[in-house]
Image (cartoon, rainbow, N blue to C red):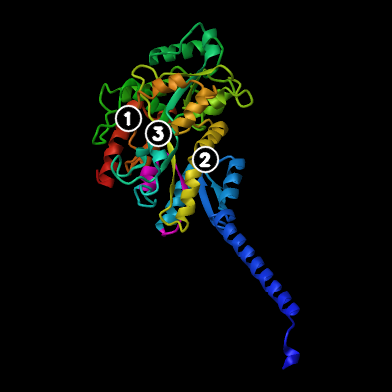
Amino acid sequence: MDRFKLSKKAITKIQAIIIAVVVIAAAGGGYYLYWYFFLRKPYAGVKITFLTPPWGVPPKELLYEFQNDTGIIVEIVSVGMGELFQKVAVASSAGQAPADVIFLGHEALARIVAPGWLEPLDDRVTDDMKNDIERLDEWRYPRGSGPLYGITVYVQLVMLEYDSAKLQELGYSEPPSTWDEFVQICVEAKQKGLYEYPVAFGARSWSWYIIALSMGDPLFDENLNPTFNGTDAPGRKAFKLLIDMFRVYQIISPERIEQLNPHPQYWAGEALIHQAWQGALRISNDPSRSKVAPNSKYMLMPEQHYTWTLDAAVGISKFSKNKDAAWEFIKWYCSKEVMIGIFNAYGLVPARKSAQQELYNQGLLEGYDIMVEQSKYVRPLPYWAPWWGEFDSKATELIQAAARGEITPDEAIDQLAAYVMQLKAKYGG
């Protein structure tokens, strides 16, 4: 048995080894705890998808930082708005998530929110968002009182802009304040050879809305019955004026009947006045993207000045399996930094007031005084009505038919008013 006895020296060595192992293990465990709580990315390996039109894609460098900070892998699926609505409808109807985070265009209330395909956000929205983000309550459904389904990303008044240098060349120091003057100036610009087609409007519903609202017609009453079809209704006069711009005055190109997008025409320096949006000067006065630069300016809508908004937001699919990670993405996407990045890329004015102020202080938010003035004259169009998309498409269809001379403006207006009543009966009011 004695041969198995250890010397004091050997015991001391063994004790030292044990202590070293314990110390190393403790140190390793401590580092593991430190790594777990402080270094590990909170959502490491979680993958989410973001379904968005091209103008909603965030800047790559900022997205990389978000992914690096959180560990969330973000797949961007960029499609047109028509395809976006289709993807959401097909997947959601089957109880599947079309994406974790969904971009919400102006028709989303009727086409995505109303069917119940989004997750309510009231329990997640922060006080910072409530205090700093404009028109947040517009994304409640039922409108104004229901749960919150989206966080506003950008605010977008529909606006008009013009080439101030060419207007001065015509002898005018201020843009037109009435629609008669609008036509007079544009006809003069055509007669003097400055432009073949001075007005960059498409043969679509928006062009009619611009004229009708600014003439003072709300288009619908509080019960969503049409107001535009009265004998002397401004909406009827506006429709006729739009068609006359195509067929009588010939100040809108016939190409705009099929090629509805008016923006490239203006940016090519081929129009005097342009249907634009809040933030459009970011592109129009960029010499790398527009021949009008640096002379484009906003103008207040003529006559009664009214316009409408085309704000956008982001929401979470009701069927997402990664709602917490999706909310982390939304918090980041709706941050001041990202909103400014989207403004720089696409000219979309941030919904955050703090971001607007920062851009204004830097001299980057051109035409801010006109934006503020125009914002006093807003009449919402009923995008929340379940039949809105069908109405809007029908309006464009009838405008195009009238612009081609297939029907008269009066016939088109009467057909459109009758169609509203059919839609209301179809959807129950």
Instruction: Say few, some or many: other residues with alpha carbon within 10 Å of mark 1 (under 14 / 14 to 19 / 20 or more).
Output: many
In the picture, which quadrant includes the N terminus? bottom right
Amino acid at circle 1: Ile
| Residue 206 found in image quarter | top left
Residue 111 counted in the magenta span: yes
Mark seen at residue 413: 1
The label nearer to you, 1 versus 2, is 2
Residue 330 point in image, percent of width and height: 47, 45
Quadrant of the rendered structure where residue 204 is?
top left
Residue 178 percent across, percent down from the top left: 38, 14
Name the N-terminal-most of marks 2 and 3: 2
Residue lying farthest front?
8
Which stretch is magenta? 94-113
Closer to us: mark 3 or mark 1?
A: 3
Q: Closest to the observer: 302 or 48?
A: 48
First-in-chain label (1 vs 2): 2
Classify residue 137 as left or right of residue 334. left
Badge 2 is on which residue? 56
Q: Quadrant of the C terminus?
A: top left
As drawn, 173 above or below 127: above
Disc 3 crowd rating (10 Å Cα; few below 14, some 14-19, many 20+) is: some
Q: Is residue 265 visible?
A: no
Mark 3 — residue?
A: 134
- Quarter of image, res 43: bottom right
Residue 76 visible: yes
Measure how far apart labels 1 and 2 are at the Cα level. 35 Å
